[in-house]
Image (spheres, rainbow, N blue to C red):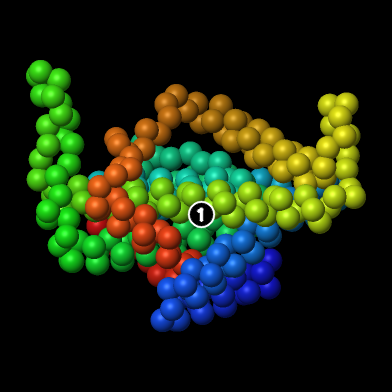
Amino acid sequence: MESVITRIGKLLAKAESTDSVDEAEALFAKAQALASRYSVELAVARRSQAKTEARETPEERTIDLGRPGQHHLKQIAALFLVVATANDVRCLIATNSSVMYPMGFPSDLDVTEAIHVALSEQMVRFGNAWLRAGDWRHEHYDAGVDRWGRVVRKPMTARVARRSFYEGFITEIRRRFTEARDEAVAESERRHAAESAVADGKRVSVTSLALREKTEEVNEFHRQRVRSLRVRSSWRGSATMATRGPSSEAGRRAGARASMSSARQVSGG
């Protein structure tokens, strides 16, 4: 685990230090692929340890995302969910979005926490730079509908511009993680092509079976926690998910070049 994290850290540190955008993106893609590959291969290895005492089991952690009432906590929480999903982690979230309760295997939780801290810091930093540049002042946004059902357009505010930027950033990070995950699964399928197992009367690849069993185990742990805590409602997230406009597109571009090397405390917003 530590050697993999060290390798990822070196790639990302190099990505952040280079002056070449193309090189930075290539290094980040390599690091991201390594993280995804590690997650998938660990699931396959974990399955072979199913009957050993040393095998990992799911657990729950508590992550403070910010102060209750802090602006844009929902976007910070939404980013956590994107990273968690990519690493087979399920979550419960406080109604005010200030605390996250991720559930999964310890190694997956470690990776999720580290990546989320780094990406959150960059999302805030890039968002601050976008606001300082001031291009958002020329925008308008949909503020709802009037009594006649017509869309009301209002001049962009700093708070709405930041939210739109963050949501564009999150959309791009989700795309990148999905792509990296798909590539990691395909690579694992090729690596273990000669291995298979029987499930539900059918022969399936060991990779597919390991990932399915991992998901089922984490989901069962999550269901038990939901029942024991008597959770009655689901987290609604942000009221809207921006998909267009200069601020959202700026967020997407920032998400495309983000690395995961920083681990400083998130602030601002």
| Spot occupied by residue 228 in the image (x, y as percentages of width and height) | 56, 29
Looking at the image, which residue is at 39% across and 40% down?
Answer: 94
| Spot occupied by residue 84 in the image (x, y as percentages of width and height) | 53, 48
Side of 28 where 6 appears, left or right: right
Q: Nearer the viewer, residue 104 or 159?
A: 159
| Spot occupied by residue 257 in the image (x, y as percentages of width and height) | 42, 65
Q: Amino acid at mark 1?
A: Arg
Q: Quadrant of residue 136?
A: bottom left
Can residue 68 be seen? no
Q: Is residue 66 above or below residue 243?
A: below
Looking at the image, which residue is at 16% across and 35% down?
Answer: 143
Helix, strand or loop at label 1? It is helix
Side of 66 where 62 appears, left or right: right
| Spot occupied by residue 69 in the image (x, y as percentages of width and height) | 25, 46
Disc 1: CA contacts within 10 A as few (<14), some (14-19) or many (>=20): some
Can residue 157 be seen? yes
Task: Count the marks.
Answer: 1
Looking at the image, which residue is at 29% across and 44% down?
Answer: 244
Instruction: Give the residue at mark 1.
Output: 176
